Amino acid sequence: MPALSVPVSAHHGNAVYDTTKTVSVTGAVTKWQLINPHAGLWIELKTASGAMEVWSGEFGGVLDLYRSLKWNKETFKPGDRVTLIGNPARNGSTAMLARKVVLAGGKEVDLEGT
Amino acid sequence: MAASWCLVPRAWCLVLWLGLGVWGVPGAEAQTARPDLSGIWQRAGGGPGLTADEPPMTAWGLEKYKAAKPIHGPRTVSPAESNAAELRCLPMGIPGIYFRPRTFEIMQMASRTVMLFEVDHMWREIFMDGRPFPDVPLGTWMGYSIGRYEGDALVVETRQFRGWDETMHRWLDRLGHPFSDDLKVTERFRRTAPDTMVNEITIDDPIAYTRPWTATMTYRLRPKGFEMGEFICNELMLSELPDMRPR
């Protein structure tokens, strides 16, 4: 997959996340932190070995998400099953810069520009 | 003093005189017509620096530039390693604040022009009444601004900054170009199209740069009905995302 451009509001440039790689993980929402300058979503999933793993996704800020997507405090609720697609942390931790999200209802949302 | 030219009863003269003071002399508006820059604006395009070319730094400037650890541009480091004042949610000053990708509103009045910034609900007062700069160094985050109209331009001079020091690496941009307490910024705002405003920014800082230099920044008018929102930088301190803040 070709490297995507870094979102306008990216906080980290590409120092923290590897923008040449893309990962996709599906799990249940445990936390939705809608704050500036970057919102965060945490999901929990079971790995192939049966261990529980928590992934975080970094998003744009409150205003960008609201203006572009009408996202708000209630966009994600604990337990929602979602897929996070994005650039993984360079240090191998279970964190990503989110590029796309598949919402609980199955709708895929492209985060470009947020 | 109003009576000598006033041809109506004295009480009405007072009303007229006070009215002219508040709303201005009818007809004078045409002679001093000011460009209309009012509206909500947002920077259009542009990168993390003021110019593509390296500005002419003094030895002092270059030393501070080398010490900078920005989170944008070719020398990007992680927020944990950065010394950008931005990441401590401190005001970036002028022109630094324009690098935040957020909107600002310009409100023009007779004696002041006010800029309202979405970032941190901050405002900037530009005094238009001909007052001089304060005669003592104020050392402020956003500087002290005095403005005037020149043809189709709003010209704003800003001084009295709190510049770079060991504890606070203050930059003009997001690339780490420093400025000192002696920084003087001159901005020329012009509306070049109904939805476009250009700001010609001259940096004059003999401590950090060998000569004054100029950059241009463009802003796009947001559509009618656009609402500025709340963007409180300090929420960053609440973030539970990894590697968001300086150590």
Image (spheres, rainbow, N blue to C red):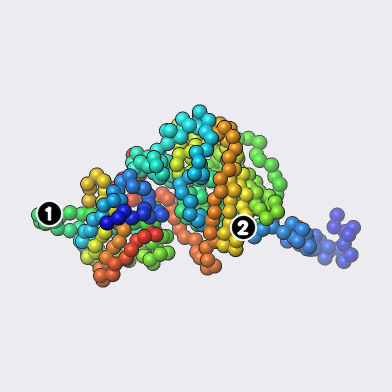
Q: How dense is the environment of label 1, judged by Cα within 10 Å: few (below 14), some, or many (20 and up)?
A: few
Between A13 and B167, the one lying in front of the other is A13
Image coords of residue B194 (percent x, y)? 60, 63
- Mark 1 and mark 2: span between their CA atoms? 60 Å
Q: Are labels 1 and 2 assigned to the same chain?
A: no
Residue name at image x 35 percent, y 41 percent: B77
Residue name at image x 17 percent, y 54 percent: A53
Chain under numbered label 2: B
Which amino acid, mark 2?
A: Arg
Residue name at image x 65 percent, y 46 percent: B146
Q: What element carries label 2?
A: strand
Which amino acid, mark 1?
A: Ala
Asked whether residue B167 is in view, the answer is: no
**Residue lying at the far bottom of the rendered structure:** A105
How many numbered discs? Answer: 2
Q: How dense is the environment of label 2, judged by Cα within 10 Å: few (below 14), some, or many (20 and up)?
A: many
Q: In which quarter of the image is the C terminus of chain B?
A: top left
Residue name at image x 29 percent, y 67 percent: A108
Instruction: In the rendered structure, find residue B231 and report the number of the disc placed on it.
Output: none
Between B140 and B150, the one lying in front of the other is B150
Q: Would you identify the image quadrant in which residue B80 lies?
A: top left
Instruction: In the rendered structure, find residue B191 and report the number of the disc placed on it.
Output: 2
Image coords of residue B76 (percent x, y)? 37, 42
Check disc 1 and report the residue beneath it.
A51
> Which of pointers 1 and 2 indicates the residue nearer the eye?
2
Q: Would you identify the image quadrant in which residue A61 lies?
A: bottom left
